[in-house]
Amino acid sequence: MVDLVYEGYFALFLIITLGIMLGNVKFRGFSLDLSAVVFVALIMGHYGIMVPEAFQTIGLVFFIFTIGIQAGPGFFDAFKKSGRQFLRVCLLLISVAALLSFTTSRLFGLDPLMGVGIFNGALTSTSGLAAAIDISGSTIPSIGYGVVYPAGAVMAILMIHLLPVILGINMKSEEKKYLLKAREDHPSVGVQNFVVENKNIHGKTIGEIGVGSMTSAVISRIQHGGDVFAPNEGTRLYLGDIIKVVGTDDALDKVELMIGPRSDKKIPHAAGNKINWLLVTNKDVINKSLNELNLTAYYSATITRIRRSGIDISPRGSSTLRFGDKVLLVSDEENMPKVMQLLGNNEKRLSETNFLPISLGIIIGVLLGAISFPFFGLFELSLGTTGGVLTAALVLSKLGKTGPVIWNMSGGANHLLRKLGLLMFLATVGTHAGAHIAEALAEYGWTLIYTGMIITIVPMLVTAMIGHYVLHINFATLLGVVAGSMTSTPGLAAADAKTDSDAATLGYATVYPLALVLMIIFSQLLVLI
């Protein structure tokens, strides 16, 4: 029975179980959550209980791939809007850490190559370590890395938990601000009736007037005399008509100026017309625009609202459909089943997990990470496995579909695979670090640990203060940016646990690829100087 504990697969699930139990313990509102797994793993590793390294790689690629798939659609928008600020934080954190590494290694009389290893261990960067070993031809950096890495990983987790406390940040308030900003970027969609009183549009078609293109609103129903019907681009508007319009507040204001005043008069449902929410699950319509589908011409149907990731979007002709979208459709009773079939509307398919896109996407990412790029003839850079998988996932998620392959995953499947990958990664890293920490400390003393802790804590604190007070970045997002700049996967887990939104994930995904490249560049520069 005792020997069973030393079996890799059993050790993995034992550490995960004990870690989750420890993570659920709260002290004055503070808990380690999933990050507690690494603490249990360190203790287990010290006593010789090891998890095979293969679980680390498998867990890491699962975790990083699902992050990229989830963050992809919003990543590029976030990069355009806030990317420069995020990248400034990333560059600042790594620059401060590199400067501290250079200074402390000279101050404490350490071998410069040992200082490079400490730099990478403090920021938990294996790609930077590999680059340093490659250009120096020495294994000395790995000694500093091996000693400091556990402390770097632990301190990154603790600092993510403590930064809101140290700076007096109310995380619930920050989360509300983030969600409010998200709603401003994607305004809520409302419904309003209007009376046609503009004489200039009398007898003209909706297409001629350009309601959709000029206001971004959608006319879903018209009452003309005693007739009620769903319109199309060729429907004519007449003075006295009552129209039902779907759009944002700004869009509805424009309609009022163009068409006529608002009305409280109710429009009865058209005889035979139905209104349903439908799921987009048919791969043949994914990435197609509403103009391409032309539901009005083919089915006399109109999509009046698109709900994506809990946000209602006012549809336009150029709006494209994504897997898992919910659309509010107005159609007659005869055509409704036809549109259902076209869009898919299959909840079972939405909940199913197709592993082909996952395995294929990871393969693409690993191959991408293996490519080396020359850097001004001085040295070569590569994204590595982690950076390659993340980059591939971000791009594939943004594409949504390539031929018959749908890259998007359902929220439930993504969450499960991401959590499983993280647990496998933490358990494996912890046991292998715990196996050597005692002997390394006995040989090199606590100087390396102190140095590593300084290089971990100071840059995180400095950049958090500048990011929040100077750049005014939302703190829920900032924690993810800091974790990404540290290339700290456990740090992201701690940041993600601080909010129910995707703020931390988007911040992490925005800066992580750059952080990988900067760690490689700075590691090689530290070796050269």
Image (cartoon, helix red, strand yellow):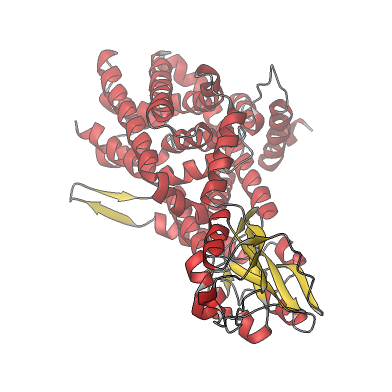
Q: Position of residue 47 (x, y in %)?
A: 62, 24
From the viewer's perspective, is residue 136 above or below residue 345?
above
Image location of residue 14, percent across then percent down: 72, 34
Q: Name which quarter of the figure residue 517 lies in.
A: top left
Does residue 14 appear left or right of residue 38 in this picture?
right
Q: Residue 63, position in %: x, y?
A: 57, 47
**64 in relation to 195, above or below:** above
Q: Nearer the viewer, residue 505 or 152?
A: 505
| Left or right of 384 on screen, residue 167 | right
346 in relation to 383, above or below: below
Q: Quadrant of residue 276?
A: bottom right
Q: Position of residue 17 (x, y in %)?
A: 73, 34
Identify which residue is drawn at 54% across, 82% down: 204
Horizontally, is 502 left or right of 87 in the view? Answer: right
Occupied quadrant, residue 464: top left
Q: Decide which of 390, 229 is in the foreground and name it.
A: 229
Q: Residue most toward the right?
A: 271
Query: Which residue lies at the image location 38% right of the left edge and 32% below the top edge?
Result: 471
Residue 121 visible to an observer of this rendering: yes
Number of marks in picture: 0
**Res 288 seen here:** no
Left or right: 169 as drawn, with respect to 19: left
- Residue drawn at 41 percent across, 48 percent down: 81
Quadrant location, the N terminus: top right
User: Where, quadrant-wise, is the C terminus in this rendering?
Assistant: top left
